[in-house]
Amino acid sequence: MDILFLPITRFKTVKSLEQKFSALLRSLIEDIAVSLETYDIPTDEPWLVEQEPASLVQWVPTPFEVARKMLELAQVSSKDRIYDLGSGDSRILIMAVEEFGVQKAVGYEIRKGLYQISKQKVQYQNLQDRITLIKGNLLNADISGASVITVYLSPKANKRLRPKLEKESRPGTRVVSYDFPIGNWKADKKVRLGKYPGSERSHTKTIYMYVLPQAFAGSTHPSAENKRELTKTAA
Ligand SMILES: C[S@@+](CC[C@H](N)C(=O)[O-])C[C@H]1O[C@@H](n2cnc3c(N)ncnc32)[C@H](O)[C@@H]1O
């Protein structure tokens, strides 16, 4: 990592060193692959390398300011039940409860280490009555109780999840996806984020906010499974 070789004297103050370091760290995190299909994570951290056959993507935490923007876009309030599918360290759920007043938040996480860390965080903050964590495959999640669903996965994982969302979500559910659109769904709101300070990357990220079933009902290419359902409903 280049930061190790930067001469300390280039930084006038400790603060500027901290800022530069955190910007580089963030850019490094952004550079880490989200998708297991395309990337190999070179790290010894047990919760990152543990093999989990059902895992669709690696853990890359959503930056807090982005998580806040996602919840704002969905206009999350105390009336909502929020589900994070692939909940990582549960930061989105904790933020939804602490900052947006959500009473019921549910996370599905496949990795044992992340699930355990999340449990500890939730217990430490005494939020266990409001946050339910399930160690399990998001593709088998019971999402019927959700009014808001957040995801940060990959194009391929979104493709696998899409028929489930179309079939099992309640009408009116808002789905917020960070960085990757969900197939050809029509976003109700879309926010393109700026580059991180210090990041060399030209790639900017986008948050997509969908309202179901409108997001896919008008689509000319709903998933095959849902097309059958829509045809049945229309008949
Ligand atoms: C890119 S991270 C996002 C984490 C969190 N949602 C956030 O925004 O900070 C994706 C997460 O999904 C989890 N994951 C991957 N495949 C999964 C699966 N089949 N079921 C449940 N979780 C899964 C990963 O372990 C990882 O924690």
Image: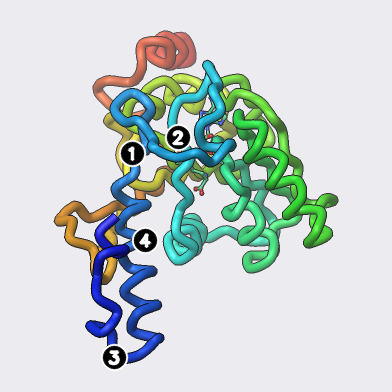
Q: CA distance from mark 1 to mark 2?
A: 7 Å
Inspect the image, locate mark 1, and give the three-letter code of the amino acid beneath it: Ala
Where does label 2 land, which residue?
Answer: 58
Q: CA distance from mark 1 to mark 4?
A: 14 Å
Disc number lying in front (4 or 2): 4
**Front residue of 183 and 66:** 66
Where does label 1 land, which residue?
Answer: 33
Q: CA distance from mark 3 to mark 2?
A: 36 Å
Residue under the image location 46 percent in, 13 percent down: 229
Where does label 3 land, which residue?
Answer: 12
Inspect the image, locate mark 2, and give the three-letter code of the amino acid beneath it: Gln
Q: Secondary structure at mark 3?
A: loop
Residue under the image location 24 percent in, 75 percent down: 7
Left or right of 220 in this view: 34: right
Labels 1 & 2 near each other (Cβ < 8 A): yes
Q: CA distance from mark 4 to mark 3?
A: 19 Å
Q: Secondary structure at mark 2?
A: loop
The verdict on label 2 being within 8 Å of ligand 1 is: yes
The C terminus - image quarter: top left
Q: CA distance from mark 3 to mark 1?
A: 33 Å
Q: Residue 6 at what x, y percent from top left?
A: 24, 70
Where does label 4 land, which residue?
Answer: 25
Labels 3 & 2 near each other (Cβ < 8 A): no
Left or right of 194 in this view: 134: right
Left or right of 200 in this view: 35: right
Disc number lying in front (1 or 4): 4
Q: Secondary structure at mark 1?
A: loop
**Front residue of 7 and 202:** 7
